[in-house]
Image (tube, grey):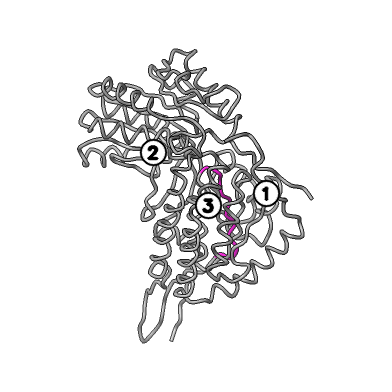
Amino acid sequence: MQTFKVISPINNRCYAERPYATNDEIEHALKASATAQAIWQNIPIEARTSICLKAVSAQLAREARSAEELSWQMGRPLRYTPGEIKGFAERARHMINIAASKLADIEIEQSAEATRLIRHTPHGIVLSIVPWNYPYLTAVNSIIPALMAGNSVIMKPASQTPLTAERLFDAFATAGLPSGLFQYLFIDHATTTKLIQHDAINYVAFTGSTQGGHEIEAAAVGRFIDIGLELGGKDPAYVRSDANTEHAIEGLVDGAFFNAGQSCCGIERIYVHKDQYRSFCDGFIELTREYRLGDPLHPDTTLGPMVNTTAATRVRNQINDAVKQGATATIDEKAFHASCVGSPYLAPQVLLNVDHSMAVMRDESFGPVVGIMQVDSDEQAVELMNDSPYGLSASIWTADSDAALTLGTQLQTGTCFMNRCDYLDPALPWSGVKNSGKGCTLSALAYERLTQPKSFHLQK
């Protein structure tokens, strides 16, 4: 039996070991999923609502266990991991509560001559491929609305966080979800590709890297199935001359370094108007120095390790290359005693004197580093913010909401924030442009992606 190990970034030791699914187990899962879905799609929306709400409550009841497991698996400080479980519940409940109205028939005509309507019909089996950095928050984006829409779901968790799939399975079982409707498979990349090509899979929801998105698209070529891709980002922020400096510093430091910067919508580059630049940089650097890097299980730790040594080395190299090109590193790594070359523990870094010739301002970092540039105008800021192959989210820090809307309209991103960042509102669609993906999750629009419109024209 072939297995895989979860190596915890906390101590570089094996935290869990699980077997990969065999071909027979995969086929059995697909058959069970199809059988269950054929019945589930005819279950009234009220019954689906009741079961899914019970599953959310069951997951919340396991918050402490799930949070500690998550810290061990991917390294986020234990003081923060319960927040992901609460966020899971917030998103899930919103999508559950709007389902009945958003999945209702769209009536076009009801007359003595004819009935015309559009019905939302489920795709069938949804394959949800979930990343390790926010496994519960990203899983809920597709799994809950897919089930509410009448689909069945097979979850493929990241090999770094497989226990999250087991916890979700337990929650659905506790809630009384019929067998076969939610399952998980531990499979490698090659097997995932074969699964996408399987005739039984009707929709693929993927959250991960841009490279992973290309691989998913390639695997689905010729299948004529829809796929949703939530991919990487190089998300920018602009601090205007009228911004509340203290508020901007607090929000953007957190946006850059929470989860050790391992967030697709984390802040990776900041543009500051020249009138604010010096005061902003001074405050930003000072607040960054207050982080406490160390054991995620220690209550005083506010910055944990990156997911593995390879990831930390990649970010460290990006920082070193920028410095060689003229950037100024403002944080003394030695002040963070846990930071160590050859380990996942990496101190946060703030780079000044950066420009777009440097990889740290062009390529996704996905780590605790941010570059800050001075700009002379709104126009320059927009030009630089759009100078990227990515387009997930952007934030504008200003006292003028009209200016934020005007500038946001010019930005090539799926989401634009004003005076906040690194957040997903479940009532708004989450989407990206350019290399940040296609399709959307969350909001009422998600149900349009997870269903197929079926037209009825009934002539009387």
Label at residue 158? none
Residue 126 covered by magenta stretch = yes
> What is the secondary structure assignment of the residue under circle 1?
helix
* Badge 3 density bin: few <14, some 14–19, many ≥20, Cα 10 Å: many
**Frontmost residue, 382 versus 113:** 382
Q: Which of marks 3 and 1 is in front?
A: 3
Q: Earlier in the sequence, mark 3 or mark 1?
A: 3
Residue 397 covered by magenta stretch = no
Q: How far apart are marks 3 and 1 (CA)?
A: 29 Å
Q: Which of marks 3 and 2 is in front?
A: 3
Residue 182: x and y in percent read 59, 63
Label at residue 412? 2
Answer left or right for 37 relative to 110.
right
Q: Which residue matches tag 3?
A: 66
Answer left or right for 63 relative to 396.
right
The region drawn magenta spans 123-133
Q: How far apart are marks 3 and 2 (CA)?
A: 37 Å
For the C terminus, which image quadrant?
bottom left
Residue 351: x and y in percent read 41, 21
Answer left or right for 392 relative to 7.
left
- Give the amino acid type for the residue marked by disc 3 in the picture: Ser
> What is the secondary structure assignment of the residue under circle 2?
loop
Question: Residue at 25% of width from left, 31% of height from top?
Answer: 246
Q: Quadrant of residue 412?
A: top left
Q: Nearer the viewer, mark 2 or mark 1?
A: 1
Q: Which of marks 3 and 2 is nearer the N terminus?
A: 3
**Frontmost residue, 46 versus 411:** 46
Q: Which residue matches tag 1?
A: 193
**Frontmost residue, 296 versus 161:** 296
